[in-house]
Image (tube, rainbow, N blue to C red):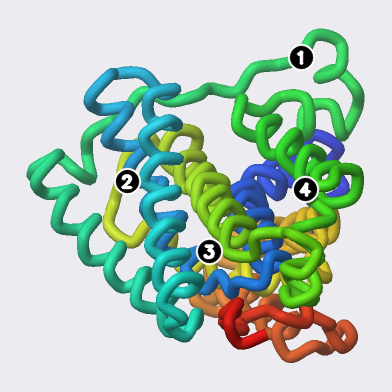
Amino acid sequence: MESFFNLNLLSDFLSTSLRLSVPLAFAALAGVLSERSGVFNIALEGKLLAGAFGAAVGAFMFNDPFAGIAVGMLFGALAGTCLAVLGVTFGVNQIVAGIAINIFVLGITAFLSRVVFGAQANTLRLPGFLRFEMPYLSEIPLIGPAIFSQDLLVYVMIVCVVLVHLFFYRTRWGLQVRAVGENPSAADSAGVSVAGVRYGCVIAAGAIAALGGCYLVLSQVFLFSEHMSAGKGFIALAAVILGRWTPVGALLACLLFGFFDALQLRLQFNYQEVPHEFFQMLPYLISILALVGLVGKPTPPAAIGKFYRREAR
């Protein structure tokens, strides 16, 4: 553990923590957007995977990572549309609908990846984004290489957090979303379309969550493999709760999970005689602690998970 006191290694550790938190942050941000409008988003895992598959297809077909982002967000938005149709229009239990979408995406991406990529699915290297150093800023000791030597999607994630925060607390539309999530009847009486707001938030959440999958493919591993989201969507759900359904809070929670994920990787390297599965439990233990509310009793939006029918007011 003495390596932690080496400035370069500590900077590399912080950089790894940030990179590992990026897919979680995109998914958690999507969870905040959806659940503040009153729709549970258990489907984050499926949306991450849909985004990863779409990114791989777009990058493979057009040999361009930006095309991968476009197709990935489209696939994520489609998954979000499915959740909105089931949960907002037909009143299906939103948790059940989310689980169904997760299972469906897991199966359909495994099937389609073999159709599109064939046997080379796990070996094909796709075009992606490389890290670049910002002049002068990347030379700041400790935090410079960690923050200012990242790839494009890391900075997109930070911009998204700022934009969603401003959307919620500085715009009339954001106020409408919060009103629908807390009291849809009152919002409806004020002339707000509850279904329209929820549709917009859930579909946008699908596209944002998909960016997390795009990051996995286009910035981390440069290929698509089955079930590569590996439970990150569920950790993001814990981050939404830990962050009290706020964009900045969710980001901080994801950075915490990213920190412990990087720590378990470092511990695996330093203590190779210990079974690696023991250290891999670390970020999941943190997410469980968040879910059971050891950091305080969470207060979700009052109307979350409740089907709203205008005629039943």
Q: Is residue 301 left or right of residue 114?
A: right
Residue 268 shown left or right of residue 256 in the figure? left
* x and y percentages locating residue 33 in the rendered image: 68, 57
Looking at the figure, which quarter contains the N terminus? bottom right
164 relative position to 279: left or right = right
Q: Quadrant of the C terminus?
A: bottom right
- The earlier-in-sequence mark between 2 and 3 is 2
- Nearer the N terminus, badge 4 or badge 3? 4
Do the residues under discs 2 and 3 have CB atoms within 8 angstroms? no
Residue at disc 1, secondary structure: loop
In the rendered structure, which amino acid carries the disc numbered 1?
Met
In three-dimensional space, the C-alpha distance between marks 1 and 3, rounded to whole angstroms, equals: 29 Å
Disc 1 or 2, which lies upstream in sequence? 2
Residue closest to the eye, 25 or 148: 25
- The part of the image, by quadrant, that contains residue 62 is top left
Which of discs 4 and 1 lies nearer the camera? The answer is 4
Residue carrying label 1: 134
Secondary structure, mark 2, is: helix
Left or right: 17 in relation to 110: right
Q: Answer yes or no: do the residues labelled 4 and 3 have beta carbons within 8 Å?
A: no
Tag 4 residue = 173
* Res. 53 mark: 2
- Is the residue 65 above or below the residue 285 in the image? above
What residue would you read off at disc 3? 232
